[in-house]
Structure formats: structure tokens, C-alpha cells
Amino acid sequence: MGLLRATSTIGGLTLVSRVLGMVRDMLVARFLGAGLASDAFLIAWRLPNLFRALFAEGAFSAVFVPMFNRTMAEHDRDDPGSGKAAAVAFAGQVLSVLFPVLLVFTVLMMVLAGPVVWAMTGGFPDGGPEKFQLAVRLTQITFPYLALISIVSLLGGILNSLDRFWVNAAAPVLLNICMIVAILFFHGDTAVETAYTQAIAVTVSGVMQLAWLMISCRQAGVVLKLGLPRLSPQVKRLLALIGPAALGAGAVQFNLLISTSLAARFLPQGAVSYLYYADRLNQLPLGLIGIGVGTAILPALSRQIGSGNEDAAIHTQNRAMELSLFLALPAAVALCISATPLIRGLLQHGAFTPADTIGAAGALAAFAVGVPAYVLIKVLTPGFYARQDTKTPVRVAVFSMLFNLVGNLTLIWPFGHVGVAISTAIAAWVNVIALYWLLHRRDQLRMDARFRAKAVRIIAASTLMGVALWFMNPLFDPYMAKGLMERIVALGLLCGIGGLVYGAASLIFRAYTLSELRAALRRPPKAS
């Protein structure tokens, strides 16, 4: 199915977006630091970003894409050539229902921004009314982004179904470009004024992403017609599945929301920012690997399960788990072992102090323990969605969130914001174990001999890389707080040498062979 090739297409563009996102975060750290304005903006950004991750990019895609493909396949089977038109008509029905719902919800959330922010933060006990009011105003500015990006997700799902993965994967680049331009050319004289420019840039980027997807859909021959809302059987089915899918796919995001809320309520000023910056680095492997692999395997699993080929579906998920572990485990080791030099080299300048580096690095090392779990959640949940089972991931997600809440309340007092990050990582592993156990109990997934052998070799290669990084950290860390070129060279050498060690160790331990990588990247033959 060209899993590595499809993943590399999505992951490559996601890498561009994440690199720009890191540039954006470096600039935000420089101009906002980790204080009042930063905490307020990050809370305002967390809300629409949460709903985007849950509905627009998570649940909606997980439910809409299989239904769109199924509609196209069924009509093509009955009347060859009619599938695309039927599927586009279904998408138009969805848009006609989605648009007014998004409009009402966005207006309601903007009106109720005060109570919503208070529920998240407790009114920022550490920052007083000024910080709370700033967060409310910034939330009102950023929230229209949710409606815009939700429609973007609908159009992106259509393009993904037509094998135009790159268009949707490239859209987030516009968000980072907008925010970088805003902070470089329109930043204010104070951190508060700069926070306003960032909030405005978020919504402007939503408009730009929507325009990009609309133009791309038109070039693909897809034009959606907005009509009167009508709850057709297909639309009812979609709406019935989205809620459970949001909870199932969004466990990590909910856990981060819980963690952020507790940090805002009980921890000193700056804790919210430490968790945010650490999570940004921590989320990099999820964006590059988990979302890429999960997006790539869902259509294949749907086809294999729909045709009754359970053995092929099990093989697909084993190879997806294998690829995910091969890419995610070394990332986790690197983020954990080299957390301090990475944070220092990327963020410590301007308003971001050495003390802020220590705070964010502690959170990053704790978050990194869960990196393989965050990725595997994205790989395992399609096994349920492809079988039209959205309820089971919900139950697992709810259990994971309760576990995270208990863990947060237990660990926040002795370990502060680091305890919050530890709890989030452990909860992710609980989620993965439960998902795998349920699939295995139903005889829908079992680790095959190849995966078990590869896992041992990947662990060995990652361990060797971790040892190398441990000895390299003291050599490169002093250069991470110097000028821009010194930082770039030091970061490049640290990451590059670590990557070379892992690559060499992988070949030595045969975690992956060159022939396997070439075969995985080869374009699969088109069906006749």
C-alpha cells in the first residue's frame, strides 16, 4: 500500500509546517517570554486549537473520509464513473449542515468567552484580573479560526480521498507564515500588544487556508453547493459518529487541556508556557509520524475490512506499528536525553530566560516518555473506525482522561508542572495498552513475529543513540546560548550525529535494511 511513501508525503509537508512552527515559537518566546502575556495568549490559542484537533482534524476526518470513500465506491460499483459526483453531493449535504452549526457555535463561544476561560483557568489566581481579561479578549479574536478550519477539514478530506494528500498537508504552513509575519513586522512595543497581533494572525490564517483549499478543490473538479440544511440518512450517520470519534481520537488533547487548566489554577506564572513550549517539541513526532501513518492506513484498512480480508488488515496495522516505533522511539529518546540543550538552543533568547529553559526542559523530558504512545494511538484507533466502531475508543479515552486527572492531582503537588507532564505521558500509555488489548481480544490485531523481532532491534538501536547523546550533551550545550549561527551549528551537529548513530545502529541490528526501505518507498503499481 506504499505506507512509507504515503507517510513521507504527508510527513514531509508536515515537517515544513512544524519547522516553521518552531521558528514561530522561537519568535513568540523571544517577544512574549513565559509570563502574563504568553500565558494569556496560549490559553486563548489552546481553545480553538483543541476543537480543531478534536473535530476538524481528528474526529471529522476519521468519520467523513471512510463515508466519502464508501459512497464513491458503492456508486462506482453500481454505475461506473458516477462515484465521484455522488460523493461530492454527499459532501455538499454535510457542508450545508455544518456551516450554520459552526456559525452559531462560534458566536456562542465568543459571547461566553469569559465563563469558558474562567472554567479553564479559575480566573488565573496568580495573574489577577488583568491576565484573565487579556485571555478573554484574545480568545474572542482567535475563536473564528475554528469555523474556518473545520470547513478546511471537510475540503481536505475530499482531496485526501482523491489521493491529493499534499494539498491538505500543506495548509498548516499558512498558519505559521501568518504568525511569523505578524510577529516580525507587526509586533507591538509591549508583550501584550504583540499577543494581540498573534491572535489576529491566527484568524487571518484560517481565511487563507480556506481560500487555498477552495482553489485546490476547484482545480480537482470539486465544487460544493451550499443549500438548505437537510438531515439525510448519511448526514445523520456522520453526526452520530462524530461525537464518539472526537472523544476517542482526542484523548491526548483532552489530557493536555486538563494539564493546562490545572497548571493555570495551581502553579506559578509561567507554568502554562513551560508546558506549551515543551508540548510543541513533544508533538513534533506525532505530527510527522502518527498523523501521517494514521491518515495513510485508514483508507487501506477500510478497503481490506470491507472486503472481509482480516488477515491483510492485521498485516497492515503490524507494519504501521513497526514503522511508527522505528520513527517514534528514537525521537522519544532524543527529546528526553537532550531536552535541556534543545530547549536552550531553540528558545533561550530575548524574554525567554535560563530559568525558563530549565522549567520547559523538565516538562519536555517527562512528555517525551509518552511519544511512542501518542503516535501508536493514531495507529490503533483506525482499527476501530474502519470497522465503524467509534464507541470503544470513547470508553478507552474516558478511562485515560480519568486516569490522567487522578495522576495530575497526585503528581502536581510534589513535582509541579513536571508532574503534570509525567501524568499525561503515563495516561497515553494506558490508552495504547487498552486499545491494543481490546483489538487483540477480538482477534482483530496481534503482534506478528516480524513486529516482535523488529521491536527488540529498534529498542537496541535507540538505546545506543541515547548513550551517544548523553555524552554529546555537555559538548554542545555551551554553544546553545550563543549567537544564531552557533546555535544552528550546535543543534545541527547534535541532531545530525544522533541521527547518524541511530541509522548506523539500525542497520547493524537490522531494525530496517536498505532493501526494506527501498521497497517501502517504491510507488505501488496502479490497479488495472
Image: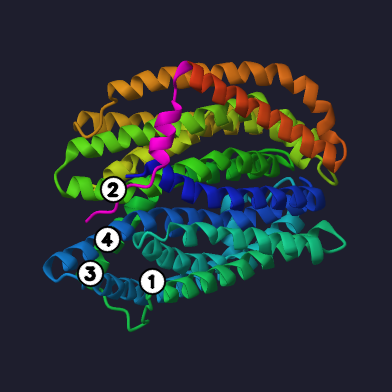
Q: Position of residue 257 (x, y in %)?
A: 54, 46
Residue at left offset 27%, top offset 70%: 84
Residue 336, located in which quarter of the rendered image? top right
Q: Position of residue 340 (x, y in %)?
A: 73, 29
Mark 1 and mark 3 lie on one chain; the one further toward the N terminus is 3
The boundaries of the magenta stretch are 509-528
Q: Quadrant of the N terminus?
A: top left
Question: Which labelled disc corresponds to residue 98?
Answer: 1
Residue type of the residue flagged with mark 1: Leu
Q: Nearer the viewer, residue 203 or 382?
A: 382
* Residue denoted by label 2: 300
* Residue denoted by label 4: 69
How far apart are the alpha carbons under marks 2 and 3? 18 Å
Residues at badges 3 and 4 in contact (C-beta under 8 Å)?
no
The local secondary structure at tag 4 comes to helix
| Mark whose residue sits in front, 4 or 1 | 4
282 left or right of 404 in image:
right
Residue at left offset 34%, top offset 24%: 451
Residue at left offset 49%, top offset 75%: 215
How far apart are the alpha carbons under marks 1 and 2? 27 Å
